[in-house]
Amino acid sequence: MVAKIINGLKISKKIQKKIKNEINIRKKNGLLIPGLAVILIGKNNSSKIYVKNKKIACKKVGFLSKIFKLSENISENKVINILKKLNKNKLIHGILVQLPLPKKFNTLKILKNISYKKDVDGFHPINIGLLCQKNPNLRSCTPLGIIQLLKKIKIKIKGINALIIGASNIVGRPMMLELLLAGCTTTIAHRFTKNLKKHIKNADLIIIAIGKPNFLHGKWIKKGAIIIDVGINRLKNGKIVGDVDFYSNYIKASYITPVPGGVGPMTVTSLLQNTLYACKKYNDLKK
Ligand code: NAD
């Protein structure tokens, strides 16, 4: 048995085509075009690439995008002032601060200053709280992208044993809330988890986001498990690999996402969907 590969790139292109069509219709009908503002602070090379990809994606579907490249020396107050102005800007419907921020910044404080109505990364305490109460509004992009991938493969995940490895604020924790919402029996493991292999063996679905190249070996997993690889790791030779040892999992799993071309493209697509959602919900319908 070999796994079916979940082609996130293909799925994401299809969704983006639909968004583009919707934007063309909005233009014809004189409706607002979604606008995304992205704030990039400092010189993190990966962040620069992610921001560039977000800009390209916006252009492709016909959104407005505005990128703010700020020096690491900028004060927290100045960043918050920029956010406050963007919160009031009628042409901007989504605001995203690219993470991780340089160490001197208080990330949670900065994120709290984005209006929850424009929080297209889904990290604002109100949006995380709503998801926690089974009433999602703007949902974190990577977990939302993964839920969409799982829907595409049409496997019923209600009641299955899901294991998330990695408990960060941006992936693991919101992923846990999404899987609970989807009805999975959900376990979340992290660097202090004892007996990780026992949890891995018990899981029907594994979502891993730890940032350790090729960490998850196929010999540990249950035969037929679904493996979702969130990791993006650049090796010394320049190659990008995930947190999953691909081949050993591929020959034992039922479904697997590749890196690149799996979860990554879906994260950007969820961001576009969230920006369109925010534009419609808080402007067309004026709630
Ligand atoms: P993070 O460093 O904030 O969190 C890592 C988590 O992994 C922590 O909870 C830690 O406890 C856990 N962990 C570390 N080593 C472990 C181990 N040996 N066993 C069990 N748990 C362990 O990382 P992050 O920001 O969540 O990112 C994780 C990975 O996902 C990175 O490679 C990142 O580049 C990638 N990522 C990809 C996307 C995407 O769109 N595909 C989006 C976000 C992050």
Image (cartoon, grey):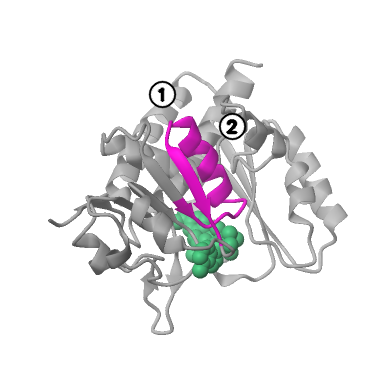
Mark 2: few/some/many CA within 10 Å (<14, 14-19, 20+): many
Residue 124 screen position, x and y as percent: 69, 40
For the record, the magenta segment spans: 164-190
Residue holding disc 2: 131
Quadrant where the image shows the N terminus: bottom left
Residue at the spot 34% in from the left edge and 42% down from the top edge = 149
Q: Amino acid at mark 1?
A: Ile
Quadrant where the image shows the C terminus: top right
Q: Is residue 169 rendered magenta in the image?
A: yes
Residue 194 screen position, x and y as percent: 53, 63
Taking 217 as reference, is 238 above or below it? below
Taking 54 as reference, is 115 above or below it? above
Label 2 and label 1: CA atoms lie apart by: 31 Å
Q: Amino acid at mark 2?
A: Leu
Residue holding disc 1: 25
Residue at the spot 41% in from the left edge and 66% down from the top edge = 243
The quarter of the picture where residue 13 lies is top left
